[in-house]
């Protein structure tokens, strides 16, 4: 540890709070010992973690750099200015705001900037891959706004752009939202721009899942087409847990006011510093190679699972994630998730488009490649991961034979990850 850095000291935590120290160690062991296939997760770098665990956590800095409501902000101001400049540069955006505490907070601020309760918004159906903040009745977005949903086509499982246009014309939304949590394909941002212009709506791209692929130039950017891009910073982008908003200059003041003081109080300066670090890392050639590999690896994983009898929704993936329909192999998403858990593979059950089964027992699973790619795995390993997942998914965990099979898969998972360790010393 450098002499002038006062940072995380694990022995201090262990002495003060052995219980929580145990949790922290247990989680590291879980990460190191298994396969992380949750599409929205990644493994942050030690540099990001160092900024997160710094004394910047102490500072109150309500306001924006140079215009704070507290004294002593000159030092932390630099972190936010550097971070904002990096975000503008990396994404070619006119304005950036790194203060949102999370993706949902970023979305809330965008609604606040452009709509009033009762206004209409048009977004993707939650059951088909949208997010809770895109109009679900259990979220502010569906309770306070009149949310209209578009869907994917039943035949292609791709966004039905004709339906988006028809609904936009019929309902005249204030905001049109594209971007999803479980959509494996590219989104046609120019078409969304056209539709938004036809009805005079704000185009908001919720890039929470894929902003890292945009940063790494692995997929087309929504920035030139959107009025505003809201995002997380912790998914493929591999930064700290948090949110970010990019927008055109004309919307900068509205967005900044909507984040603070309308929806949030003091910014988390340690998280903003960590976001700045992640944005620097994401500007490198190494990160671009990573982003390209994430997409290649997701394709290899999807292909391997298809070879094992599962059906890839929309026929595959262009991104970091794939959705698999398990009906062809007669397993539910919940069974698959539970069985994989026993085999030290973490993934999530997921509804598939037009799923006949209820959301708590959906027909599919969602898998993603950000974490395994960070660990250094390539296509041969992803093919092996697919075979291990398939063995686990097909093993009946309520029978002795199935449990023995799951134990064997767990052992092979352990062997595989030991060759690609997370947080190697
Ligand atoms: C993950 C996600 C969010 C929410 O991010 P949180 O940080 O969990 O609040 C919002 N929108 C989309 C599309 C997401 O995938």
Image (spheres, rainbow, N blue to C red):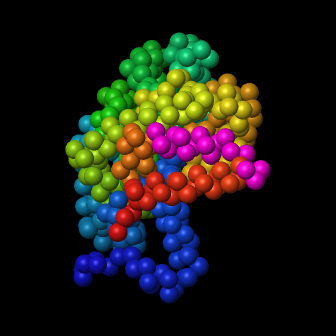
The stretch drawn in magenta includes residue 387: yes
The residue closer to the viewer here, 200 or 75, is: 75
Q: Quadrant of residue 193?
A: top left
**Number of marks drawn:** 0
The residue closer to the viewer here, 17 or 338, is: 338
The residue closer to the viewer here, 356 or 95, is: 356
Q: Residue at x 51, y 16 (%)?
A: 161
Q: Is residue 43 above or below residue 141?
A: below
Q: Residue at x 44, y 84 (%)?
A: 12
Q: Residue at x 45, y 14 (%)?
A: 198
Judge from the rendering whether residue 220 lies leftward or rightward of residue 235; answer left or right.
left
Please state the horizontal and vertical placement of residue 192, each as a whole percent of the image: 44, 21
Please state the horizontal and vertical placement of residue 116, each as a whole percent of the image: 56, 36
Please state the horizontal and vertical placement of residue 258, each as a whole percent of the image: 46, 46
How would you classify the magenta stretch by its main secondary structure? helix
Q: Residue at x 53, y 47 (%)?
A: 38
Where's the C terminus, which quadrant? Answer: bottom left
Judge from the rendering whether residue 394 lies leftward or rightward of residue 323; answer left or right.
right
Where's the N terminus, which quadrant? Answer: bottom left
Q: Is residue 63 visible?
A: no
Q: Which residues are magenta?
A: 383-401
Q: Quadrant of residue 305?
A: top right
The stretch drawn in magenta includes residue 270: no
Q: Is residue 142 above or below residue 314?
A: below
Furthest residue to the bottom?
Answer: 15
Q: Is residue 369 above or below residue 226?
A: below
Please state the horizontal and vertical placement of residue 401, each as a whole percent of the image: 73, 50
């Amino acid at each position: 540890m450098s002499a002038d850095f006062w940072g995380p000291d694990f022995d201090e935590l262990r002495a003060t709070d052995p219980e929580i120290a145990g949790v922290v160690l247990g989680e590291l062991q879980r990460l190191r010992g298994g396969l992380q296939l949750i599409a929205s997760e990644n493994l942050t770098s030690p540099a990001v973690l160092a900024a997160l665990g710094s004394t910047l956590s102490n500072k109150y800095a309500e306001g924006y750099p140079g215009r704070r409501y507290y004294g002593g902000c000159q030092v932390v101001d630099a972190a936010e200015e550097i971070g904002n400049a990096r975000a503008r540069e990396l994404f070619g955006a006119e304005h950036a705001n790194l203060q949102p505490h999370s993706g949902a907070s970023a979305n809330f601020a965008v609604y606040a900037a452009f709509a009033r309760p009762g206004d209409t918004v048009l977004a993707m159906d939650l059951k088909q891959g949208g997010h809770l903040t895109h109009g679900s009745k259990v979220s502010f977005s569906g309770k306070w706004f009149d949310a209209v949903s578009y869907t994917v086509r039943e035949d292609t499982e791709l966004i039905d752009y004709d339906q988006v246009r028809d609904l936009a014309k019929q309902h005249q939304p204030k905001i049109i939202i594209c971007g999803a949590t479980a959509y494996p394909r590219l989104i046609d941002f120019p078409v969304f721009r056209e539709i938004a212009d036809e009805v005079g709506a704000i185009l908001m791209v919720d890039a929470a899942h894929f902003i890292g692929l945009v940063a790494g130039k692995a997929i087309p950017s929504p920035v030139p087409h959107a009025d505003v891009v809201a995002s997380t910073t912790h998914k493929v982008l591999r930064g700290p847990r948090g949110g970010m908003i990019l927008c055109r200059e004309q919307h900068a003041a509205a967005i900044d006011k909507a984040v603070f003081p309308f929806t949030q109080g003091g910014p988390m300066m340690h998280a903003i510093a960590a976001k700045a670090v992640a944005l620097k890392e994401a500007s490198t050639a190494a990160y671009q190679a990573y982003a390209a590999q994430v997409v290649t690896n997701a394709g290899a994983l999807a292909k391997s699972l298809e070879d094992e009898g599962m059906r890839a929704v929309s026929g595959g993936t262009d991104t970091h994630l794939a959705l698999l329909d398990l009906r062809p192999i007669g397993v539910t998403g919940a069974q698959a998730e539970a069985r994989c858990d026993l085999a030290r593979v973490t993934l999530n059950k997921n509804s598939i488009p037009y799923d006949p089964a209820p959301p708590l027992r959906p027909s599919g699973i969602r898998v993603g490649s950000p974490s395994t790619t960070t660990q250094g795995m390539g296509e041969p390993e992803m093919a092996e991961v697919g075979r291990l997942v398939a063995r686990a998914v097909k093993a009946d965990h309520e029978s002795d034979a199935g449990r023995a099979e799951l134990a064997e898969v767990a052992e092979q998972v352990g062997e595989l990850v030991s060759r690609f360790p997370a947080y190697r010393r």
